Image (spheres, rainbow, N blue to C red):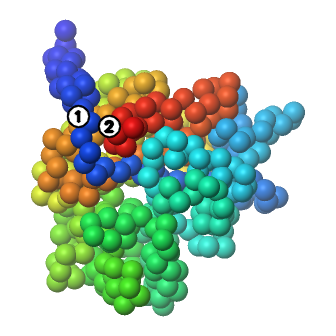
């Protein structure tokens, strides 16, 4: 046995102990799921994001990724519409049945197709709607686009969301906000951490003034130490604690061209949670359903023309459920590291990027992943 194989087996046994030792206490835990709503192609523009994603998933080898509401046309083209009211109402019901508490929507300008599903959620009249909240996942490039002159209108929009009864709040009524892909030059300078501090304080002050409370900002990072340094730089520039917590958009550790085995991936995932914990900041554990962006290699996207082909072997639904159980037990093992009790599933619908829990076409498994997750959450979170 090779040395690295021995290490993985030892770590895997530790991971198994975290999985099987889950306790069904009544602690307040919550699972959200990221939404990237690019699964629409109702426009005729060849440059439209939804059209591009439909082309990526057109090859038959990737049909197992197609959302459950997809149609494979006679000419092989794919059509779908994630903002259709009936689709949205069904997905709300699916999420509630699986025990998911909220969706974290990737935020885009309100007049783009990428915001259509968010608006469909907000206007849904589903009887399940009151059981599924939402929060914002703000992307740095969109947040900083247009600089400070454009920021006020964005803050007004976001704070209006905070005031809704269905916005997800933590730690005494604080609106939960994820921050993704912050960079030092986002605001047009090489030292944007003071600019990020300024923008987030403007956001915070506007939210408090509107009676919506102080936002709970969660910085998403792929490197724990780097994330902690960024949080420290922003907090120092602000002269107060702005960034409360670390998490990640996905787990991309230990990917390989051959396809890293799922057990290796989950071992590395737990290691990453511990690296986040060791920074001393609070943690919302990212619970990823994999990583396999190879459809974007076969058919490059305009905004990602050089996609890295490395990937993780897809889990079975049962393996995915076990990883969710591992996250629950990690939080109960380290309760002070995750004081909010939140967890972030990555993701609801990152189908072409290969980390999704949402339902696919029936012939490829339907909602088996959601059912497996639901079995765990119903017992160990909702105590059903």
Q: Which residue is mark 2?
A: 380
- The correct choice, above or below, for 33 with respect to 171 in the image is above
Residue 356 appears in view: no
Question: Are the two marked residues, 2 and 1, in contact with CB atoms closer than 8 angstroms?
Answer: yes
Crowding near pointer 2: few (<14 within 10 Å), some, many (20+)? many
Crowding near pointer 1: few (<14 within 10 Å), some, many (20+)? some
Where residue 290 appears, as percent x and y from the top left, is 43, 35
Relative depth, front residue between 31 and 46: 31
* Residue at 25% in and 25% down: 20
Ranked by sequence position, the earlier of labels 2 and 1 is 1
Q: CA distance from mark 2 to mark 1?
A: 7 Å
- The correct choice, above or below, for 20 with respect to 287 in the image is above
Relative depth, front residue between 323 and 271: 323
* Residue at 47% in and 27% down: 317
Where residue 80 appears, as percent x and y from the top left, is 73, 47
Q: Which mark is residue 23?
A: 1
Where residue 383 appears, as percent x and y from the top left, is 34, 39
Where residue 294 appears, as percent x and y from the top left, is 54, 35
Say left or right for 225 vs 315. Answer: left
Q: Which mark is residue 374?
A: none
Residue 194 appears in view: yes
* Residue at 53% in and 46% down: 95
Relative depth, front residue between 274 and 306: 274
């Amino acid at each position: 046995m090779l040395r690295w194989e021995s290490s993985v087996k030892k770590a895997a046994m530790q991971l198994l102990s975290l999985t099987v030792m889950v306790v069904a206490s009544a602690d307040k835990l919550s699972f959200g799921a990221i939404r990237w709503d690019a699964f629409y192609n109702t426009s005729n523009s060849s440059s439209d994001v939804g059209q591009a994603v439909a082309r990526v998933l057109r090859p038959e080898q990737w049909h197992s990724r197609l959302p459950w509401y997809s149609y494979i046309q006679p000419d092989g083209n794919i059509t779908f519409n994630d903002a259709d009211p009936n689709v949205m109402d069904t997905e709300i019901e699916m999420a509630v049945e699986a025990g998911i508490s909220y969706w974290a929507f990737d935020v885009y300008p309100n007049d783009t197709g990428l915001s259509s599903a968010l608006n469909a959620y907000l206007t849904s009249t589903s009887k399940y709607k009151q059981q599924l909240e939402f929060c914002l996942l703000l992307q740095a490039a969109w947040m900083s686009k247009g600089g400070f002159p454009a920021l006020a209108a964005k803050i007004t929009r976001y704070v209006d969301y905070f005031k809704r009864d269905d916005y997800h709040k933590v730690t005494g009524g604080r609106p939960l906000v994820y921050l993704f892909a912050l960079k030092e030059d986002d605001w047009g300078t090489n030292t944007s951490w003071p600019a990020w501090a300024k923008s987030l304080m403007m956001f915070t002050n506007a939210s408090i003034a509107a009676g919506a409370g102080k936002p709970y900002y969660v910085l998403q990072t792929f490197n724990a130490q780097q994330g902690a340094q960024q949080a420290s730089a922003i907090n120092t520039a602000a002269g107060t604690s702005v960034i409360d917590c670390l998490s990640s958009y996905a787990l991309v550790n230990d990917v390989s061209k051959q396809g890293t085995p799922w057990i290796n991936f989950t071992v590395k995932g737990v290691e990453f949670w511990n690296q986040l914990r060791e920074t001393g900041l609070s943690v919302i554990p990212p619970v990823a359903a994999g990583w396999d962006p190879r459809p974007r290699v076969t058919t490059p996207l305009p905004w990602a023309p050089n996609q890295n082909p490395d990937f993780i072997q897809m889990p079975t639904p049962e393996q995915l459920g076990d990883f969710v159980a591992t996250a629950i037990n990690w939080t109960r093992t380290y309760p002070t590291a995750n004081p909010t009790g939140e967890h972030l599933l990555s993701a609801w619908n990152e189908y072409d990027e290969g980390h999704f829990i949402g339902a696919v076409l029936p012939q490829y498994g339907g909602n088996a992943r959601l059912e497996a997750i639901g079995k765990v959450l119903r017992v160990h979170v909702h105590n059903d």
